[in-house]
Image (cartoon, rainbow, N blue to C red):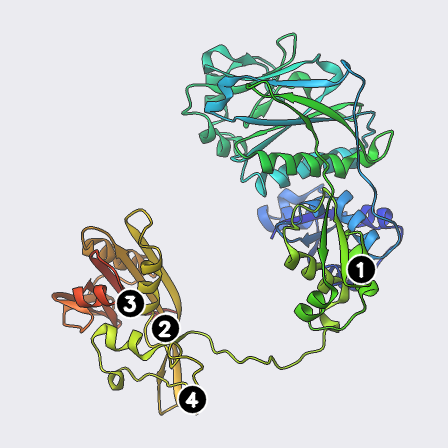
Amino acid sequence: MPTVSVKRDLLFEALGRAYTDEEFDELCFEFGLELDEITSEKDIISKERGDGKAEGASDTVLYKIDVPANRYDLLCLEGLVRGLQVFKERINLPRYKKIMPAKGEGQRLIITEETAQVRPYAVAAVLRNITFTKERYDSFIDLQEKLHQNICRKRALVAIGTHDLDTVTGPFTFTAKAPSEIKFKPLNQSQEYTASQLMDLYRTDSHLRHYLHLIENKPLYPIIYDSNGVVLSMPPIINGEHTKISLNTRNVFIECTGTDITKAKIVLDILVTMFSEYCEKPFSVEAAEVIYPNGKTHIYPELAYRREKVKPEFINKKIGISETPSNLAKLLTRMCLKSHVTGNGNNIEIEIPPTRADIIHACDIVEDAAIAYGYNNIQMTIPKTYTIANQCSQEDIADKLGMDISATKAVHIANPKTAEFQVARTSLLPGLLKTIAANRKMPLPLKLFEISDIVVKDASTDVGARNYRHLCALYYNKSPGFEIIHGLLDRVMQLLEVPPNQENGYMIKATEGSAFFPGRCAEIIAKGQSIGKLGVLHPDVITKFELTMPCSALEINIEPFV
């Protein structure tokens, strides 16, 4: 889960009241968040680098708040405060507006066909007459970084560029050129570099070096120019120094380039909805025109509102409550999902704002209703259906592996609902073989592993059974790949710091197993005890699981190492 760091006093000022740490922790829980840590810049530096390095650092109290990974609207102070204020019913959810400039006066971003080889998509918008303070500016930059690490997948899907619009002249061109043809002064540098030189410069940069691989092996690098040839950015690496925004910036041109147009549109919507509240016309965004190589024109940001209908009984049933339709609509409105009852109370119509890209289908709406209702307020009841995890059929753990069920020490289920669930599993191998069978059309090789519990009878325990944690791995290909499974065992033991020797380490010795091909099975002995087997599976076993290729397997008990 992403963690958002906010200054406590700044947060309380924005919320309009102060909280004790316990009160704010409870508020976060009610809203579906978690107050992870209360710290300060000084404490953070002291923990990471020692007390000496923390000299002179700020003592300002910081709240570190864990937010769900898909709640992009909560990744900054502005969104967090807005969400909490709506949740506490202190404000109404703002209505975000897209302003269309007069014909010929709007900003245009022209995409050339060369970008198809590297980053084919782009969206853009303008925050007009915005007012920055130091705190707002820091939050603006921090949100971009949070989005880059989250939905943008470290800039692989989307890269954000923000520019002082008053320093450049449109229309803008998004194209791609050979590295030797690109030359500009990058952000926070005092001289110009070619794109090739920038790659060398940033190869040792602790922050930017992680993004170089996205384009460095491409024949062309993406670049954005204004009408005078001034470079705005070389996405996804660095912006130009010329368009650097500052506290004095009044008009911000935002461009998001990427390989995923859907993600790019979401990122742009989040950025402009979060910070348009500081514009002269709050929550209003100036649209920009993007022209694609095929001549088609798109207007961004979309700021699309959509409506969904959900039946009240569906919400009540899924959560386990019995609220009236009007109360459910009120709960959803508190979660920034403006809702009202329609018809004769048979439906609740929910308006999904552009900030809530996480709402994909009805279950997401139900989840928000449950959060607003309060998980602690849901009455605990015994489920009508009983299920026991990790069950198997007798055929899977015995017959298909060439064993007699009596030899498996399997725990039998007293009242199995189906033949599939008669016993608790004694091996992870059948489950992985079933997974391979379900995915056998995927490209080869198939390599799977699982770490989980198995259950066997044990008369020495008070319940008559014992759990063991096992590791199982499979290699499925045109050739058996025994050496790959053997290599995996060696690597696992290396990481567990178990040396390959007989005295105090591990060793393998030839053995036989009903599930394995004769002469192709080995017993694994570690710390003086047998912990499992590895080898090539018997053709009969492979056939019974509806497979057609050779398969090597490893299964060990990892209890001695944990």
Residue drawn at x 80%, y 59% is: 329
Q: Residue at x 79, y 33 (%)?
A: 134
Label 2 or label 4, whichever comes before in sequence order? 4
- Name the residue carrying label 3: 555
Q: Amino acid at mark 3?
A: Glu
N-terminal of the pair, mark 3 or mark 1, is: 1
Residue indicated by mark 4: 414
- Residue at the spot 29% in from the left edge and 63% down from the top edge: 498
Residue type, label 1: Ala
Q: Amino acid at mark 2?
A: Glu
> In this orientation, which residue lies closer to the viewer: 189 or 146?
146
Q: CA distance from mark 3 to mark 1?
A: 52 Å
Disc 4 residue type (three-letter): Ala
Q: Position of residue 516 (x, y in %)?
A: 18, 68
Distance of label 2 from label 4 (alpha carbons): 28 Å
Left-right relation of 78 to 519: right
Within-10-Å neighbours for mark 2: few <14, some 14–19, many 20+:
few
Residue under pointer 2: 559
SS for callout 1 = helix
Residue furthest to the left in view is 519
Between 193 and 160, the one lying in front of the other is 160
Q: Quadrant of residue 25?
A: bottom right
The residue indicated by pointer 1 is: 329
248 over 225 or under it: above or below? below
